[in-house]
């Protein structure tokens, strides 16, 4: 098996555990060891593992219909899910195009934005703008707007470079970005951003005021705003969607990961009706010739629908706001350690950036935690917690204590 994002040498030096079961906050390997899933299995298992309601919803749908394409066909679960997703946004005049993973949702968004300009007589507007250090997936379009040097440098010849905006500072000053955007306004079709937190860049946070200023600039200049909520959506930041902190209403929203709480691959691109309506086929055929075999798969859609019901009935998002304060209070003292550069928290995201004097420090933290039964993956010099949203207060106390102890022990 080819392990993604994994150095081949580590597979020999430290054979990976074979995970065979999950329950709540925990994963269990073939040898019976229990591990805390401290990063929600790449940020998607928002409701933990083995949730009985999700298992039941999947089984029920599997007995009825396992798959049906959405090309000239439809099925109830996709219709229901599209309606519920549209209703979650500030303006519900939306159409939803399903896909299977986050990168595909972003790829769709870019193609929709570009074809929209052709549909409306502005084919010269071909440029996209994105934040420096952003990550939007590993397909080529997504890499063009989310270029991470360490991941993607060898693919540069295949890419169409985006206009790069500086990462906002703590003040949220929009002046520098505004100047860059202004120089390209006539050729820009859209700006794409991860809202409030750049995940793969090391959980880099920026103020909601900056995002609000960007949205206002986009409206004033006829530039579409694409918000990539794949990692930050579904309660992670203390709101259902991170863009809500800025009080904005984006043109296109990309979602995935926690949409099905990590039970099955499903993602979506949620688009304003005003854009969708330009893809008519009369008098000129401007059909969107794009799709995925498993888009809107009935079983995945059923899992997503049950996920949304659980979020609503158990008030998951409201709980995050309480747990966020607990997480921030537990990690705050680490900022005083000599080996720590910065502590950053937002919702149920807690990141500690180690000082660059020892590039192996974060790996030592990971190894210490692994030996203590906690699974996480550093992002360069940044070690972070991003647990399932259903983690209890007691479990969070134990996890943060182990996390802090490992950082201290790593020196």
Image (cartoon, grey):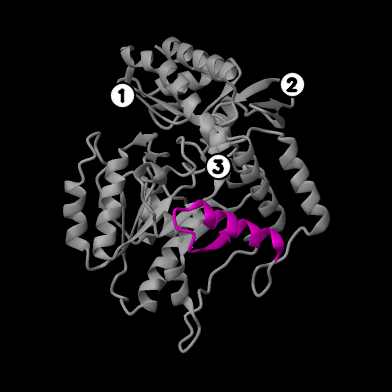
Could you say whether the residue bearing mark 2 is in a helix, strand or loop? Answer: loop
The part of the chain drawn in magenta is: 75-98
- Whether residue 294 is visible, yes or no, is no
Q: Which residue is mark 1?
A: 356
Is the residue 268 above or below the residue 274 in the image?
A: above
Q: Residue at point 38% right, 50% down?
A: 146
In-front residue for pair 399/368: 399
Q: Is residue 86 magenta?
A: yes
Tell me whether circle 1 and circle 3 mark residues in contact (CB < 8 Å): no
Which badge, 1 or 3, is on the more N-terminal residue? 3
Q: Quadrant of residue 262?
A: top right
Q: Which residue is mark 2?
A: 32
Find residue 350 and report its horizontal and vertical position in percent. Answer: 43, 26
Find residue 399 and report its horizontal and vertical position in percent. Answer: 54, 18
Is the residue 283 above or below the residue 252 in the image?
A: below
Which badge, 2 or 3, is on the more N-terminal residue? 3
In-front residue for pair 312/323: 312
- Dot in front, 2 or 3: 2
Is the residue 63 above or below the residue 111 in the image?
A: above
């Amino acid at each position: 098996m080819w392990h993604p994002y994994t150095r081949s040498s580590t597979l020999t030096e430290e054979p990976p555990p074979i995970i065979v079961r999950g329950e709540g906050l925990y994963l269990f390997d073939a040898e019976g060891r229990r591990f805390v899933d401290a990063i929600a299995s790449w940020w998607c298992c928002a409701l933990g593992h083995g949730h009985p309601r999700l298992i039941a919803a999947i089984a029920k749908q599997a007995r009825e219909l396992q798959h049906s394409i959405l090309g000239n066909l439809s099925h109830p679960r996709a219709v229901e899910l599209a309606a519920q997703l549209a209703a979650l946004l500030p303006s519900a005049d939306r159409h939803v195009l399903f896909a299977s993973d986050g990168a595909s949702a972003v790829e769709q968004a870019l193609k929709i934005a570009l074809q929209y300009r052709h549909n409306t007589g502005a084919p010269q507007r071909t440029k996209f703008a994105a934040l420096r250090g952003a990550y939007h997936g590993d397909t080529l379009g997504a890499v063009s707007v989310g270029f991470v040097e360490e991941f993607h440098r060898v693919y540069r010849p295949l890419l169409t470079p985006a206009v790069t905006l500086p990462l906002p500072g703590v003040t949220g000053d929009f002046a520098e970005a505004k100047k860059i955007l202004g120089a390209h306004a006539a050729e820009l079709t859209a700006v794409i951003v991860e809202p409030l937190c750049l995940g793969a860049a090391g959980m880099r946070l920026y103020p909601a005021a900056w995002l609000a200023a960007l949205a206002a600039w986009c409206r004033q200049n006829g530039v579409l705003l694409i918000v990539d909520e794949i990692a930050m959506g579904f309660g992670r930041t203390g709101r259902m969607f991170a863009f809500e902190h800025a009080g904005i209403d984006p043109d296109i929203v990309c979602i995935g990961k926690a949409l099905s709480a990590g039970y099955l691959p499903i993602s979506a691109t949620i688009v304003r009706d005003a854009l969708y309506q330009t893809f008519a086929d009369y008098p000129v055929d401007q059909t969107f010739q794009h799709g995925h075999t498993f888009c809107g798969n009935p079983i995945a859609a059923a899992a997503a629908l049950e996920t949304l019901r659980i979020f609503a009935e158990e008030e998951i998002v409201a709980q995050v706001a309480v747990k966020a304060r607990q997480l921030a209070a537990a990690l705050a003292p680490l900022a005083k350690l000599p080996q720590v550069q910065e502590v950053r928290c937002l919702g149920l995201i807690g990141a500690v950036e180690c000082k660059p004097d020892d590039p192996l420090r974060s790996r030592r933290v990971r190894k210490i935690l692994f030996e203590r039964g906690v699974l996480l993956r550093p992002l360069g010099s940044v070690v972070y917690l991003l647990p399932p949203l259903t983690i209890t207060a007691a479990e969070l106390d134990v996890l943060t204590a182990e996390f802090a102890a490992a950082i201290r022990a790593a020196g």
